[in-house]
Amino acid sequence: MARRARMREAGPLALAVLLAGLACVPGMARAGDESAGTRAAAYLTQGGGPAVLAMGGAAIGGGEGLQAASWNVAALSGAGPMQLYFAHALVGDGGTQGWASAGGRLRGGATRWALTATFRDEGVILGRDAHDQPTGDVSANALALGVQLARPFGERFALGAGTRVVTEAIADERGLGLAFDAGAQARFGMLRLGISGRDFGGGMRWVGQRWRMPASFGAGLALVHAPSGVTLALDGVAPANYYRSIRAGAEWAIRERIALRGGYRTELGAQADEPLTGPTFGLGARAGLAWVDYAVVIAGNGETSHRFALSLRRSGGVHAPSAVAPVRTPFGPEPPPVR
């Protein structure tokens, strides 16, 4: 009884946090291209999951599990008992980005945890001195290691927080920094709402100077119709060092075996050839305990990028329909068993 009372008390608190965040998001970040290049570790804002990227990057309100936790750490509260996740992408001219995460539920409680690692290799770039004269080819890479925690409060609300240590290296120079994440989600029947703050606070020391992290703040909503497996999502995101963006996406999950996805992202006020504006497509497929995700992103400048991911999970998808009656959990139905 005492536990239920605490949960009832936490519900209004979580809702207050969510509504306050939704009201404050428009003023939390002043985005614009004039700030581009003024922050460290800008690659962190891209996220790691092709399942979300295939939906235009919209996951703040309706995302669940390890992939969506890159966009809203509160989405981790929808993760199953245990998952392992690996993603890979080609970026830029010859660069690569890898992402890995492991997470699950803490024993004896509803709290979920995740450990994440992001590795970015820019390949070989042409170095220049203070007078813009070439100094030869140098290597550039970065690594971010993080920990995330999220907890549902009743069946409607969830809160999450995380932090990560970030290093960047160009030739013999190296920077070291710290960033924080926080988020909230709420469920009201088919409607899902969320707010998210990513990579804020902390900062990075680089060659004797302190650089701020690439903070971004956003809000999102989604409609999830579990019997049909259909999800519609819409996010608004305000980065501190780039254009504000609107992201929309849809997913159709077919009986825990196949997921079809599509979306569109637009950078507000950007040029027509903005590389982050354009349509996205993707799909997911299950084979035993493995789930494979693929996304293709068509940029406004005509370039196309492909992203792949492999996850190992003990249970099926969270939105897939099932003939088996779901079991109630502290944050919505437990995914039905894999068949």
Image (cartoon, rainbow, N blue to C red):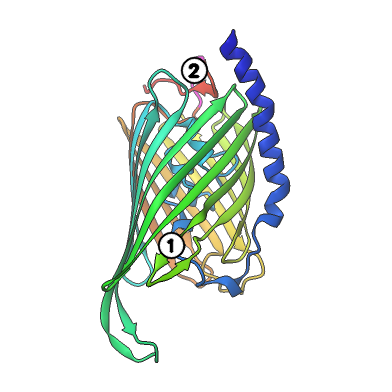
| Image location (x, y in percent) of residue 168 | 35, 64
- How packed is label 1: few (under 14 Cα within 10 Å), some, or many (20 or more)? many
Residue stretch in magenta: 321-325
What secondary structure is marked by label 1?
A: strand
Q: Nearer the viewer, mark 1 or mark 2?
A: 1
| Image location (x, y in percent) of residue 107 | 38, 21
Q: Nearer the viewer, residue 306 or 213?
A: 213
Q: Is residue 72 visible?
A: yes
Who's the residue at 31% across and 30% down the image? 289
Who's the residue at 63% across and 65% down the image? 31
Q: Which mark is residue 323?
A: 2
Amino acid on which disc 1 is placed: Met
Magenta stretch: dominant SS?
loop
Amino acid on which disc 2 is placed: Ala
| Image location (x, y in percent) of residue 133 | 35, 92
From the viewer's perspective, is 272 left or right of 296? Answer: right
| Image location (x, y in percent) of residue 311 | 34, 39
- Residue marked by disc 1: 204
Q: Which mark is residue 107?
A: none
Q: Is residue 71 visible?
A: no
Asked if the magenta segment contains residue 324, the reply would be: yes
Asked if the magenta segment contains residue 289, the reply would be: no
Who's the residue at 64% across and 47% down the image? 219
In the rendered image, the quadrant that contains the N terminus is top right
What secondary structure is marked by label 2?
A: loop
Q: Nearer the viewer, residue 103 or 245?
A: 103
Q: Is residue 325 above or below residue 115?
A: above
